[in-house]
Image (spheres, rainbow, N blue to C red):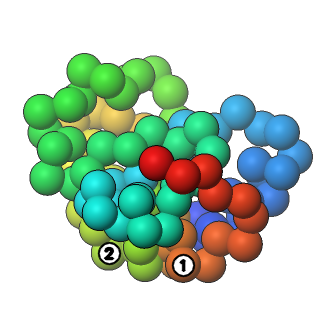
Amino acid sequence: MKEITVTEIEQRFLNGEKLSIIDVREHEELVIHGKIPNSIHIPLHELPNRLDEIDQNEQHFLLCQSGGRSAIACSFLQEHGYKAINIIDGIVNWTGKFEQK
């Protein structure tokens, strides 16, 4: 599985790169902590039923609180032919701005 750190993603984000970040945390977590601007929220348990919302031709970065659930999501997407990279250290290490859900 391909992996990247949240620091590397944050730097690419700050450089203005258009990134597809999929946040697989639960709804309650987004209400409490917010989310990365322009990220897509698809909770892990909803992922199998929402594949049609994900562009199979685009590279996606999977994010959760600390990297565990996003690893599961990343493996699932890769098994279904998607280009996915796990953000290994999760949103707890994001130092940038958040948008509220």
Residue that mark 1 sits on: 92
Q: Looking at the picture, does residue 87 appear above or below residue 39?
A: below
Residue 98 occupies which quadrant of the picture?
Answer: bottom right
From the viewer's perspective, is the residue at label 1 or at label 2 nearer?
1
Secondary structure at badge 1 equals helix
Q: Name the quadrant of the N terminus.
A: bottom left
Horizontal arrangement in the rendering, residue 41 relative to residue 14 (left or right):
left
Type of amino acid at the residue the image marks with label 1: Val
Residue 18 % position (x, y): 70, 33
The local crowd at label 1, few if under 14, some if 14 to 19, many if 20 or more residues have their Cα within 10 Å, is few
Check the image and name the residue furthest to the right: 15
Q: Residue at x 40, y 22 (%)?
A: 55
**Cα gap from disc 1 to disc 2, whole angstroms:** 12 Å
Residue at 53% across, 43% down:
39
How crowded pointer 2 is (Cα within 10 Å; few <14, some 14-19, many 20+) is rated as some
- Pointer 2: what residue? 68
Identify the amino acid type marked 2. Answer: Gly
Label 2: which secondary element: helix
**Does residue 86 appear anywhere in the picture?**
no
Count of picture labels? 2
Residue 56 drawn above or below residue 11: above
Q: Earlier in the sequence, mark 1 or mark 2?
A: 2
Image position of 69 with respect to 100: above or below: below
